[in-house]
Every structure is written in structure tokens, then in C-alpha cells.
Amino acid sequence: MTAAKAWNAAQVRTWLERRLEASRLDQAAADKRGYSAQDDYDRAAAEEWVCRSFVKADCTSDPVAFAGRVKALLDQDDYRITGIYDDRRFEREVRTYLRKLAKMIKTNDGFEKTSRFQ
């Protein structure tokens, strides 16, 4: 039986920074495509909102605290942001991304994938 991987806070922060940068690029690309890419824009804005919430947070050093903060955000009723196209779609995408992040924290897997496209 192999031992579980140790939590690597620096790797988690690097992953968050790279996803934040990728989401900004995705928003710019969707914005250039116009009306037909509004879904993509809101999806990228949701990813940016989630990553921005954690990129400078101290909770990323401890997986239990990080998971607790993700759960607290999931329990929120709404997420305030301006410049998106559809509030319901944005909130749905935020919740989807938070659930993905919670799963990654629980399994401690996926933070090594830092390429733009995932």
C-alpha cells in the first residue's frame, strides 16, 4: 500500500494562479467571439471568481481549512459580480467549479496539471 501524497501548498497556489490567468484569457477570447460565446464567457468568469477567492488566501496551506472555506462558499446563496451575461448561469458555474475544487482537495489530485487547457 502506498502512502498518500503530502499536501503541497505551493503547488496548489501555483495551480490557482495559472487557472486565474487561463480564465482571463478564456474570457478575452469569448468576448471577441461575441454573442454566441456568452456561455463561455460566464464559465470563465466563474472560474476566475473562484480562483481569485483563494489565490491569496492563507487557507490553501491546510487542506482541512481550504475544504472548509470551499464548503462555506458553496453554502452561499448568491455570488456578486458585475459584467457577466446571465446571473443564474454564472452562479451554476461557480458552484460547479467549487465542487470540482472540493473533489481535488479531498483526493489531493489534479493540482499538478498546470497547462492552460484542462
Image (spheres, grey):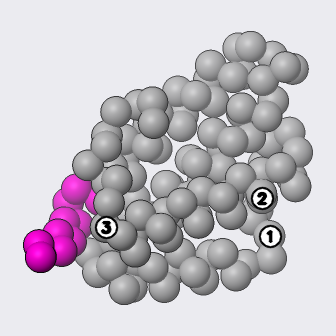
Q: Is residue 108 above or below residue 42?
A: below
Q: Is residue 26 left or right of residue 59?
A: right
Q: In the image, what residue occupies the spot 70% across and 14% down? A: 32
Q: On the image, which quarter does residue 11 sit in?
A: bottom left
| Element class at badge 3 | loop
Nearest to N terminus: mark 3 or mark 1: 1
Q: Secondary structure at mark 2?
A: helix
**Is the residue marked by circle 2 packed among few (<14), some (14-19), or many (20+) residues within 10 Å?**
some
Dominant SS in magenta: loop
Q: Which residue is mark 1?
A: 78
CA distance for labels 2 and 1: 7 Å
- Residue 76 image point, x, y percent: 73, 78
- Across and down, in percent, residue 49 comes to 60, 54
Quick one: label 2 or label 3, which is nearer the N terminus?
A: 2
> Which residue bears the numbered disc 3?
108
Instruction: For marks 3 and 1, give the CA distance.
Output: 27 Å
Task: Tell me, yes or no, if residue 76 can be seen here.
Answer: yes
Residue denoted by label 2: 91
How many residues crowd around disc 1 within 10 Å: few (fewer than 14), some, or many (20 or more)? some
x and y, in percent, of residue 63 in the image: 33, 79
Q: Nearer the viewer, residue 14 or 92?
A: 92
Q: Which residues are magenta?
A: 1-13
Compare marks 2 and 1 and give the one earlier in the sequence.
1
Give the camera-side residue of 50 and 109.
Answer: 109
**What is the three-letter code of the residue carrying label 1?**
Asp
The residue positioned 29% from the left and 81% from the top of the image is 62
Q: Are marks 2 and 1 in contact (CB under 8 Å)?
A: yes
The CA distance from mark 2 to mark 3 is 25 Å
